[in-house]
Amino acid sequence: MTDARLPAHLEAASLLRRAQSAGGFGTIIARGDRDRGVLILLIANRGMHIACLERGLAPSGDYAWQAVGPARAAAATEISAWCAQRHDFDRDSWLIELDIPHPERFIAETTSIG
C-alpha cells in the first residue's frame, strides 16, 4: 500500500488545468476535505454528460479511478440528484465538473495514471 498521494485540493487544481489545456473548462461543484477527500469527476462534452469517475481506494490498497453514477447522456436532473445524494453521504468528497473535447481520451489518460 502506498501513501504517495497528493492532497485532494492539489489534485483538483491539476484536473482543472488539464481540462483547460485540452481546450475545455472545469469547475468545482463541491469542495471536500482539503487533504484526503475523494475526487469525483463529472465529465461532459459540450454540455452532454459522458461519465462519472471516482478516485478511491482499490482492494490492492492503491488508488484507482472507477466509473460511478449516472450513465452516459443522463438527464441533468438525474445527475444533479445523484451529486446531491453522493455529497450528502460523504461531505469530504470533491465534485468536479469537466467539460472537455475528446472526453474518451481524457478518461483513458486519467484512469491509466491512477
Image (spheres, helix red, strand yellow):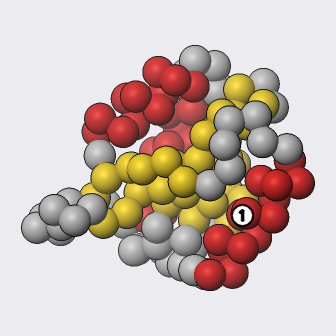
Mark 1 sits on what residue?
Answer: 83
- Whether residue 85 is visible, yes or no, is yes
Residue 32: give x, y in percent of width and height: 57, 73
Q: Residue furthest left?
A: 1
Q: Is residue 45 left or right of residue 112?
A: right
What secondary structure is marked by label 1? helix
| Quarter of the rendering occupied by the N terminus | bottom left
Residue 87, compared with residue 75, is above or below; it is below
Q: Amino acid at mark 1?
A: Cys
Image quadrant of residue 89? bottom right
Residue 103, compared with residue 71, is above or below; it is above
- Whether residue 10 is visible, yes or no, is no
Q: Residue furthest front?
A: 71
Residue 67, compared with residue 5, is above or below; it is above
- In the foreground, 60 or 96: 60
Residue 74: give x, y in percent of width and height: 78, 42
- Rendered residue at 61%/40% (across/down): 51
